[in-house]
Image (cartoon, grey):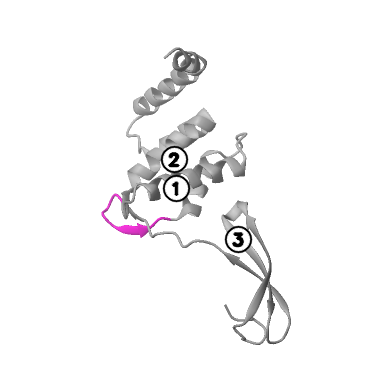
Amino acid sequence: MRCPFCGNDEQRVLESRPVLEVDAIRRRRECGGCGRRFTTFERAERPRLFVVKRDGGRQEFDREKLIESMRLAARKRPISALALRAAADKIERDLLNEAAEEVASREVGARAMRALQGLDPVAYVRYASVYQEFECMGDFAQMVAQAEQDERLAPFKDLQNALL
């Protein structure tokens, strides 16, 4: 690490603290050459993950793109930006933990659908309508009916899980 003011590579760390929102460590440093203070942020470099598109093309996984697609589906719905970020973080973390270098775009979409289904059924239906590329209104109606059925059964699923 070099001082941004004089370029000296000798500093001492005055203070370190975690920054939970971005999984980083904030360090307050003092340069041994000029004595000025500056702040650095350190975070672990994440392994590269590639998404294989439907046409066979490869693209590096973009967490912000995933969040934006979920945000569009959740527009004007009672879902916080923090909840969407947490869902995207979990999706990315799960994909990285599976130790695969590539993942199919349909798998990323399916995980986003499951996350939205747990957050808001309307956002889930909106996302699914784009992601699944319905051919006719019947496909869409069937998916909405299934979502309604799942929503009606949700209180009983908790009871059923408790009994098992």
Report the Cα–Cα distance between label 1 and label 3.
19 Å
Q: Amino acid at mark 2?
A: Ala
Is 139 rendered above or below residue 154?
below
Could you tell me the amino acid type at mark 3?
A: Ile
Identify the residue shown where x is 41% and y is 14%.
164
Q: Estimate the x, y position of residue 124 in percent, counting from the top left.
A: 47, 33
- Give yes or no for residue 57 being in the magenta stretch: yes
Mark 3: which secondary structure? Answer: strand
Tag 3 residue: 25
Residue range corresponding to the magenta coloring:
52-61
The location of residue 75, given as percent across then percent down, is: 58, 40
Q: In this view of the protein, which residue sits in the foreground, 162 or 141? A: 162
Q: Residue at x 29, y 57 (%)?
A: 57
Point 65% across, 66% down: residue: 27
Task: Name the residue beneath numbered marker 1.
Answer: 93
Quadrant of the rendering where the N terminus is positioned: bottom right
The residue type indicated by label 1 comes to Arg
Name the residue beneath numbered marker 2: 112
**Marks 3 and 2, how far apart at CA:** 29 Å
